[in-house]
Amino acid sequence: MNCRELTDFLADYLDGNLPLGQRILMTIHLLLCRDCRRYLKSYETTIKLAHAVGQPVPELDAPIPKELVAAILAARGQMR
Amino acid sequence: MPAKSEPIKVELNTAGQVSADSGEAELLSRLRAGDSAAFETLVMEQGGRMLSVAHRFLSHEQDAADAVQDALLSAFKAIGSFKGEAKLGTWLHRILVNACLMRRRLQDRQSTETIDSFLPQFDSTGHHAERVPRFELSPSEVLVNKELRQHIRDCIDALPADYREILILRDIEEMDTESAAKILNVSLAVVKTRLHRARQALRALLIPFQQRK
């Protein structure tokens, strides 16, 4: 296995969907290749960063603004 | 207030299979009867959470507000078809995701940009063409560092639309591959390929930020 192949399999590797044979080849390559170890770690961290961005933060987890409520109710009134 | 947009396709999410509790059942009954006060209750109870979800898809405050309005009005129109098999919030969430995706598509210009330039490069033997730098950004920092959070959002926004949508649905909304494929009307293989490329591209876009730190 080379770096290109390892990179192609990263998502399946992290999801645990890789067949045992490929998983072993990947593990061996990771032991030998610093660039791929770093790439794997950065790929995993990127997923976590994206997920963290979606977590509620206090200023965005507030009640719906009154102005928006009024606009929605007005728009609903026009539907009838 | 909101820009006029295309009708939103409403689908029942039957994945949850959770019965509505009595309070929700009563609210549903009133909504189906066209009770204005019930609609206001729905807006007040669900609106804040929906706005928070819309912010994950849409960077601008007004766009997020408009998507929530689109979704609530669509839900109100379609309330007669809601069977109560899933929780009302789950059903609204699906409608909101559709509304957000639609609004993003309206905004996105036809783009010829390609994601290839963000993917890793390999030499003729299949090995990394360049040294891979250490990646030192921390997920825990996102919660306390506004600049980092905004930068990640900007990088997600910079992804080509087809890739950005998948990344948001899978890695932010935590939707499974099957649900994402259904909502985007693409195959499972396309979801997997685009998600992998989107993550790689996001990674590449984040590298300069850590070097700036």
Image (cartoon, grey):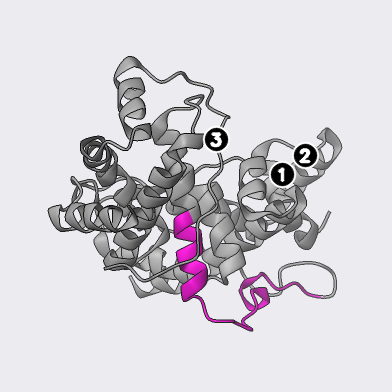
Give the SS element for disc 1: helix
Quarter holding the C terminus of chain B is bottom left
Asked whether the viewer can see residue B213, the reply is yes
**Seen in the image, is B168 located left or right of residue B179?**
left
> In whole angstroms, how far apart are the C-alphas of marks 3 and 1?
27 Å
Q: Residues within 10 Å of mark 3 (few under 14, many from 20)?
A: many
Where residue B176 appears, as percent x and y from the top left, is: 60, 40
A73 lies left or right of B182: left
| Disc with the residue nearer the chain's start (2 vs 1) | 1
Instruction: Tell me if residue A76 comes above or below residue B19 in the rendering.
Output: below
Which residue corresponds to the image point at 32% horizontal and 65% vertical from the top-left? Answer: B150
Above or below for B170 versus B110: above
Specify start and end residues of the magenta stretch as a single range. Answer: B99-123
Do callouts 2 and 1 mark residues in contact (Cβ within 8 Å)?
A: yes
Q: Chain of mark 2?
A: A
Crowd rating for badge 1 (residues with CA inside 10 Å; few <14, some 14–19, many 20+): some
Residue B129 x/y as whole percent:
71, 74
- Would you identify the image quadrant in which residue A72 lies? bottom left
Q: How many marks?
A: 3
Disc 3 marks which amino acid? Asn
Residue position marked by numbered label 1 in the rendering: A12
Magenta span has B212?
Answer: no
Same chain check for tags 2 and 1: yes
